[in-house]
Image (spheres, rainbow, N blue to C red):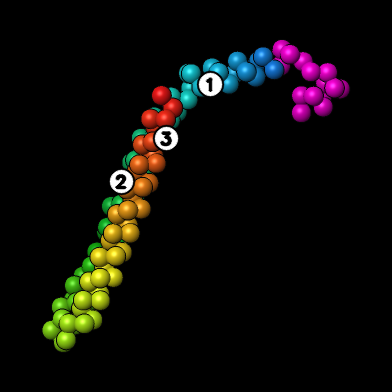
């Protein structure tokens, strides 16, 4: 855009100004911005985890009742429900763990 607007002449003061702006942002603004964003994302994940746990509470109750009833009736359905519950819980745990690792990695990468 600078090349096009200046009719083919490269203005070095604009290039040096852009470079100085990038370096000053990297050294001054970026560390504070990354720390604030990591803090906000961790808080958001914490609140989101509480909401998901609260929303899944009825599911846990249903899995418990269905599992107990199925276990008394024959056991096969109860075992499969427990496997499904365990699988969902493990997948959610891995997802949250990976998300937290990525947020922390982004926070420490900038230093």
Q: Is residue 8 magenta?
A: yes
**Does the magenta segment cover residue 10?**
yes
Is mark 3 in CB contact (under 8 Å) with mark 1? no
Quadrant position of the N terminus in the picture: top right
Q: Can you say which quadrant of the picture contains the C terminus?
A: top left
- Judged by depth in the image, the label closer to the viewer, 3 or 2, is 3
Instruction: Identify the residue position indicated by label 1 in the image.
Output: 25
Q: Is residue 20 above or below residue 103?
A: above
Q: Give me the C-alpha separation between circle 1 and circle 2.
A: 30 Å
- Mark closer to the observer (3, 1): 3
Q: Position of residue 98 (x, y in %)?
A: 36, 47
**Which residue is disc 3 drawn over?**
106
Q: Name the element at disc 3.
A: helix
Q: Residue furthest bottom?
A: 73
The magenta stretch is: 1-14
Query: Is 6 drawn above or below residue 58 in the view shown?
Result: above
Q: Position of residue 10 (x, y in %)?
A: 79, 18
- Residue 93 shown left or right of residue 1 in the figure: left
The secondary element bearing badge 1 is classed as helix
| Mark closest to the chain's N terminus, 3 or 1 | 1
Residue 46 is labelled as: 2
């Amino acid at each position: 855009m600078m090349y096009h607007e200046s009719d083919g002449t490269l203005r070095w003061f604009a290039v040096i100004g852009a470079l100085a702006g990038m370096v000053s942002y990297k050294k001054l603004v970026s560390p504070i911005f990354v720390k604030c964003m990591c803090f906000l994302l961790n808080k958001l994940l914490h609140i989101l985890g509480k909401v998901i746990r609260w929303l899944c509470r009825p599911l846990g109750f249903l899995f418990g009742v269905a599992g107990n009833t199925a276990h008394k009736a024959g056991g096969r359905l109860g075992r499969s429900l427990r496997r499904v519950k365990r699988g969902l819980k493990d997948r959610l745990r891995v997802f949250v763990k990976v998300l937290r690792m990525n947020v922390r990695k982004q926070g420490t990468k900038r230093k």
